[in-house]
Each structure stands twice: as structure tokens, then as C-alpha cells.
Image (cartoon, grey):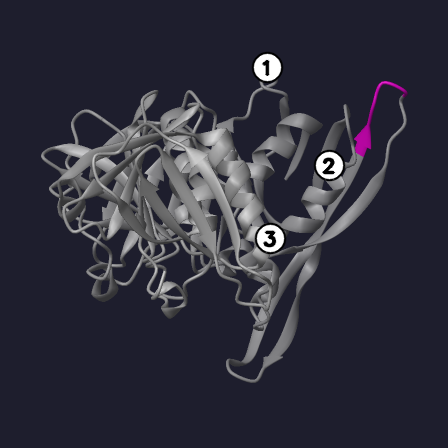
Amino acid sequence: MKIGIEQDVLKMALEKGALASLSDEAKTETSSMATLIKAVKITVDENLTIESATQLLGTRYSIPATKEGGIDVKETGVIMVSAQELYDWVSRQAKSKIVMSLDKLEIPEMITLDDEDDGQNVIKKIGSLKLASRDESKTGAKWALDCYDASQASLVDFSKKPETLFGVEAKLLKTGLKNIAFSASKKDDKHVWDGISFQTYKEKLYMLATDCTRLAVYDLDVKNNKLDMNLLMPSVLLASVMKIIDNASMLKFGYNKDDARAYIFTSNMDIRFATADPSQVSKFLPIDTIIQKDYSPFVKINKKLLSQRLMSVAMAKSSNALLTFKEETLLLHVISESGYKPSFATVPINKVAEEFKDVFSIGHILDVIKAITSDELEINIPENKKSLKLTTSDNERVSYYIMTVATPLYRDQ
């Protein structure tokens, strides 16, 4: 294989096609097969195709290999090299043309690797990938990377595509993630509480995120929605993919029940995600239990003032606050969990019809305030008054639900 390629074209292609082998999961891989898991497969024929895969994520990116597109093919072929090393070197060759050529060994070298769990594994090295860059100054850099037999890698077969369940524009999905992803847990090994859930209610498609104590819901409002299940995808993986996809791209989502994997297809990129174990998905809150619950408008609050007062009382070193809505005032009361004196603050509100008080997470309210763009936060309450529904008038797509906090600290307040 031998090609000349513009640096920016190769860098972008690696960011997309090598996403799995550049991920944190790949970087922390320690098995005897780590060399292959951290490697990227590059195929050159009429197209430039870059592929990588881990247990959680698989990616393939393909573009036409044409001179007009910044790719000059001298010789077709397939290579497999360290993704991180190649990407780091390419990133340092700004505004250059890069020549990549495979220098094959006459006899492949067999590298034996020992693993306590897997026993011995053999990796076949077939040669070296020679790299050379050259910019307008007619100077550049050279390097070489070990090249392995690509047939040894466990990559995703994207030729068998599942049925498209729904399609959504990347820009809309990114906006939805930005509005709700913070409500998911940071990490959950079963990928239930750190996931983004896609669910259907009366033919409308929603995204949900929750950590069991709060919930965020975003209305995607897509057409031709065929999703009839709870599609639960790891939030971190979905966000990492969205960073490298153009806003104008149309994303087609599918699901394979046989291996519990979700798929996203674009015009030139295919992605496969691990999803939550089907036996665990039922733990996630069904969308109808939220949509069908009746919340009544209660009060509107200036978000800037509320944010200032919450941050003030939080200095008493507590994660929670007692909120008392009475007449035209919201009283914030924090009892310290670290020996500080109690802290109080008040916020003006429009007159409420009845007094209401309970304990809520300060951080959860502040997270919502950071996410919304409106100057006012609208608070709605259900009949049992065990949660708050937070909304804004300028974005009807999103709603936030914050549960009360059970704590004995405020029992006598």
C-alpha cells in the first residue's frame, strides 16, 4: 500500500474511523490482545476506509480515495497500526502532505504474548508503515510504525445492517444531549443509570436521562418513528460520537436483538454501541409513567437570583436545602452536615396559592439553571408533592424532574 494524503484529510478520517481504538476503553486495555484493540485498520482501494473496535464501541469511516478529495493512491492495500501513535504523529504535521507506504517483511514475524487469563496469543507483524510529511517549505518529518496482519483483528461487520428504527438530525440530537446528559450517572457498570434512553410515547420519540434521584426528558419530535422498545445507550459513548459528526448529518438508528447492540449509520460513517443488558433495561423508568403524571403550574422564579441564593446557602457545607414556598417568598434553609451554623436565604416569587416545603438537592437545581437559557424557571408540582417539574417558556422540548430528599436533618423544621 502506498498513498499521498493531505494532513487534514487523514487527521479527520482517523478521528472518526479510529474513534474506538482511541477511546479510554482501548487505552486501558491490558490483555494480550491490547496491541490489536489499540490498532486501526486502514484499507485503500477506490475508497479510504478506517475501522476500529472495542467491546463497547465499533466505528467505520469511508470516503472516496480521489485526488480531488486530497488522496492520491499509488498502490492499494490494507494496513493495521497503532491508532494513538499514528494519530499523534499526523496531528503534528500541520498543512503537510503525508506519504504512507507499507514496507513488507519477506517472512512475517510472529510475536508471542503471554496473558494470565488468556494464555498465549500470537500476533503477526507483516512489516513497517513508513511515514513522511512535507509542507510548503519542502521540509518535513519521517517516522515508521509496526504494521500487523489486519485479519487478526475483531472488527464489526457493518454489511449486515439492522432495520432503521428512527432517523434524527445530528444537530437536534446534540442539543438534546446537552440539555439532559448531566442528569445521568457518571458511571454504571451495567449501563442503565449512565445511559441515554430513547423511548416512544404515542408515536413521539423522547430522550431520557436519570440517576434515580432526578430525570431529564427531551422531545425529539422525529417523523416515521418505529421504535417500540427502550433503547438504552451509554451516555459517554454517545457524546463522544456526536463530537465528531457534522451537525447536518442525518443519523439512522437501528438495533440488533441478537447481540444487544445499537447502530448509527450516516452517509459515510457506521457506529456500533454496546447497550444495557436486556435483563436490566426494565429498571429504567418507562416514559409513560412520567408523561401521564399530572403536574400543575406552581410558581415562576428568576433563575439568576435563585442561583445566587443557592450558592450562598451551600457555603454551610450541605448538598441539600429545605425549600419553603410561602406567599411571595421562597425561603432556603440549610442545616450543615459539617459543623457549620445553619444558613438562610430568601428569593422573591409570585404569590403562591398554598404553602409548600420539602428538601431538595442544591446541585440538581443548579444543574438545571445552568442548562436553561430562559431568565425564568417555572416550577410545577404533582398532587403528592414528592417531586418538582422544572420547565421554561422558551424551550418546550425539555423538562426536568427533581425528587425530594429523605433526610432526618429537617424533620423538626
Which secondary structure lies at badge 2? helix
Asked if the residue at tag 3 contacts the one at tag 2, i.e. Cβ–Cβ closer than 8 Å, the answer is no
Mark 3 surroundings within 10 Å by alpha-carbon count, few (fewer than 14), some (14 through 19), many (20 or more): some
The spot of residue 224 in percent (x, y) is 16, 27
Q: Closer to the camera: disc 3 or disc 1?
A: 3
Q: Earlier in the sequence, mark 2 or mark 1?
A: 1
Kindly state the secondary structure of the residue where label 3 is placed.
helix
Name the image quarter holding the N terminus.
top right
Q: Tell me the quarter of the image containing the C terminus.
A: bottom left
Q: In the rendered view, does 68 fall on the left or right side of 394? A: right
Disc assigned to residue 91? 2
Q: CA distance from mark 2 to mark 1?
A: 22 Å
Q: Quadrant of residue 389?
A: top left
**Residue sitting at x 29%, y 30%:** 351
Q: Dot 1 lies on which element?
A: loop
Identify which residue, 216 or 153, lies in the foreground: 216
Of mark 3 and mark 1, the one earlier in the sequence is: 1
Q: Start and end of the magenta stretch? A: 133-137
Residue 171's spot in the image, x, y percent? 41, 25
Numbered circle sitting on residue 315: 3
Horizontal side of residue 133 vs 361, given as left or right: right
